Image (cartoon, grey):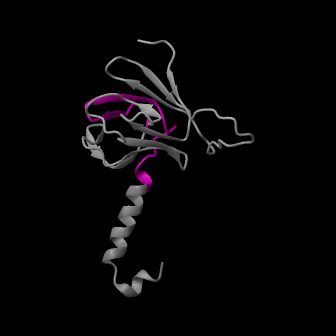
């Protein structure tokens, strides 16, 4: 197991000027491979994960597609999106197409397990969504003339 994490960032180049703008509130994504404990730090806001040599995070495993998934920091949260991979993406044992990542989540890309050590700073509580859903249900049963009163 390595002490220093593998850092995933975009390659430096000779272009002058500010060319890498990090989104407001950006925090690196920190991962740990379950197989060998290797730590990975994603320091760019978008990272392609796959078996292909052009992937930002290359995982040479037969169950990983060439372009398996994408990590992206958008709207203040880290997200993972399945790029129509053959073996899919599971988040906490549930198949997903697109989902928010939080510290403590377990990601499975094909047969490769990854622990999310640091990601979106805070898991949003579903309380507001529950309240809004209850209000929508109430509105649906009201007669049409009473719906406009709100």
Residue 83, how many percent across, how many down?
Answer: 35, 47
Image point (54%, 50%), residue name: 75
In the picture provided, is 74 more to the left or to the right than 87?
A: right
Is residue 51 magenta-colored?
no
Image point (45%, 21%), residue name: 39
Image point (30%, 35%), residue name: 64
Image vertical order of residue 133 relative to residue 112, above or below:
below
Q: Which residues are magenta?
A: 102-128
Residue 55, how many percent across, how many down?
Answer: 44, 36
Image vertical order of residue 117 relative to residue 95, above or below:
above
Quarter of the image for residue 79 reads top left
Residue 141, how many percent across, how many down?
Answer: 30, 76
Is residue 104 magenta-colored?
yes
Q: Nearer the viewer, residue 46 or 147?
A: 46
Quarter of the image for residue 23 reads top right
Residue 47, how many percent across, how many down?
Answer: 48, 39
In the picture provided, is 14 more to the left or to the right than 135?
A: right
């Amino acid at each position: 197991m390595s002490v220093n994490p593998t850092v995933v960032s975009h390659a430096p180049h000779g272009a002058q000027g500010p060319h890498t703008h990090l989104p407001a509130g950006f925090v690196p994504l920190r991962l740990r491979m379950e197989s060998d404990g290797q730590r990975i730090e994603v320091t760019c806001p978008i990272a392609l994960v796959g078996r292909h040599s052009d992937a930002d995070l290359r995982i040479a495993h037969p169950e990983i597609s060439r372009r398996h998934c994408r990590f992206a920091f958008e709207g203040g949260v880290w997200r993972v999106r399945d790029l129509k991979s053959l073996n899919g993406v599971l988040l906490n044992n549930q198949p997903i197409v697109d989902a928010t990542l939080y510290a403590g989540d377990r990601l499975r890309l094909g047969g490769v397990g990854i622990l999310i050590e640091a990601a979106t700073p805070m898991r949003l509580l579903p309380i507001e969504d529950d309240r809004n859903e209850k209000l929508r249900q109430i509105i649906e049963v009201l007669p049409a003339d009473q719906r406009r009163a709100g």
